[in-house]
Amino acid sequence: MNIKTFSDNTKIIIPCIALVLVAQAVGKGMSAWEALPGALVMFVIIIASLQIKDWLPKLPLPAFAWATLLALLLSMPYSPVGPVFMKLTDKIDFLSTTTPLLAFAGLSVGNSLDKLKSLSWKIVIISLVVFTSAFFGAALVAQTILKFQHII
């Protein structure tokens, strides 16, 4: 990643993290100062995932998948940095991260409405199939786990 790309990415990432900190303050009543170390860790993981995506262009994984994988590996109990990573990021509420992500996802879809229009009515059917499959898949997993734990 060159300096211009880093700068462009940072111009997008910093407002997102600022929104996370604001949502953190509004939602949990926690000051942004308390959540700042976790937000900085998030920033480093985002930049690292974008860099990994640049280094491995032949792998069809988006940067979001790399960020998820990297955070998973760093947060595992047998990771040498796991306890420190968890201590720093434990202050960040999951819901406060999803709100800005969904807002930016909506903006990105809004910028490509012409592409969505070209898909016509087929996108509605595909969406319904995907939503229904995801719902029943999650219900099946939940049912299996709850039965395995003898809760139901």
Image (cartoon, grey):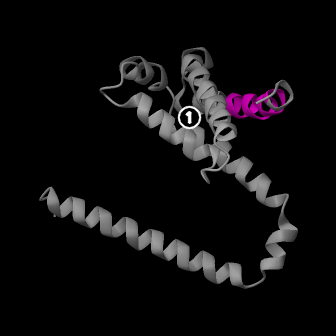
Residue at (54, 22) in percent of width and height: 38
- Find the residue positioned furthest to the front: 58
| Left or right: 87, with 151 as reference point | right
From this view, report whether residue 66 is shown above or below residue 125.
Answer: above
Tally of numbered tags? 1
Residue at (63, 83) in percent of width and height: 125
From this view, report whether residue 104 is shown above or below residue 17.
Answer: below
From this view, report whether residue 106 is shown above or below residue 45.
Answer: below
The picture places residue 26, in percent across and down from the top left corner, at: 61, 31
- Find the residue positioned furthest to the top: 33
* The N terminus, quarter of image: top right
Magenta segment boundaries in residue numbering:
6-19
Residue 5 covered by magenta stretch: no
Helix, strand or loop status at disc 1? helix
Which kind of residue does numbered mark 1 sit on? Gly
Q: What main secondary structure does the magenta stretch of the protein show?
A: helix
User: Label 1 neighbourhood size at 10 Å, few (<14), some (14-19), many (20+)?
Assistant: few
The picture places residue 20, in percent across and down from the top left corner, at: 64, 32
Residue at (53, 72) in percent of width and height: 131
The picture places residue 78, in percent across and down from the top left corner, at: 30, 26
The picture places residue 11, in percent across and down from the top left corner, at: 81, 30
Circle 1 is placed at which residue position?
A: 27
| Left or right: 58, with 140 as reference point | right
Observer-nearest of 15 and 52: 52
